Amino acid sequence: MKKKYKIEVDCAACANKMEDAAKKTAGVKDAVVSFMAQKMEIEFEEGAEISTVMKNVSKACKKAEPDCEIFQ
């Protein structure tokens, strides 16, 4: 399953950090972050609990880029 989220991030390098952090999160099959569109698309692994995975994605992204926001 794929879901899109609106994000707020300051630069393309920061968006790349968010994408890398999201991809390493358990339950995430793939992640794409677009700085220009200010959007994040997450593809979840089969059977993943989306709300739990997104909490972990948010934590990982905040650790990689403290100024980012993911609107759920």
Image (tube, rainbow, N blue to C red):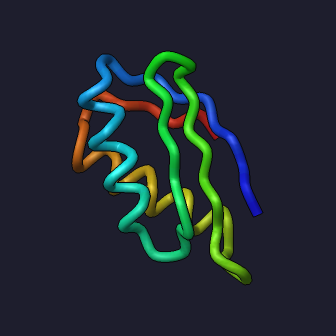
Residue nearest the observer in this picture, 67 or 16: 16
Q: Which quadrant, please, contains the C terminus?
A: top right
Which of the 4 image quarters holds residue 25? bottom left
Residue appearing at x 49%, y 16% in the figure: 36
Residue 60 drawn at (x, y percent): 33, 56
Residue appearing at x 64%, y 67% in the figure: 44
Which of the 4 image quarters holds residue 18? top left
Residue 43 drawn at (x, y percent): 64, 60
Q: Which quadrant, please, contains the N terminus?
A: bottom right
Residue appearing at x 50%, y 58% in the figure: 55
Work out whether 53 lies above or below 57.
below
Total labels: the figure holds 0
Residue appearing at x 33%, y 55% in the figure: 21
Q: Residue furthest right?
A: 1
Q: Would residue 28 be found to the left or right of residue 25 on screen?
A: right
Residue nearest the observer in this picture, 57 or 19: 19
Q: Would residue 47 be found to the left or right of residue 6 on screen?
A: right
Q: Residue furthest bottom?
A: 47
Work out whether 15 lies above or below 57.
above
Work out whether 42 lies above or below 8.
below
Q: Would residue 16 be found to the left or right of residue 52 on screen?
A: left
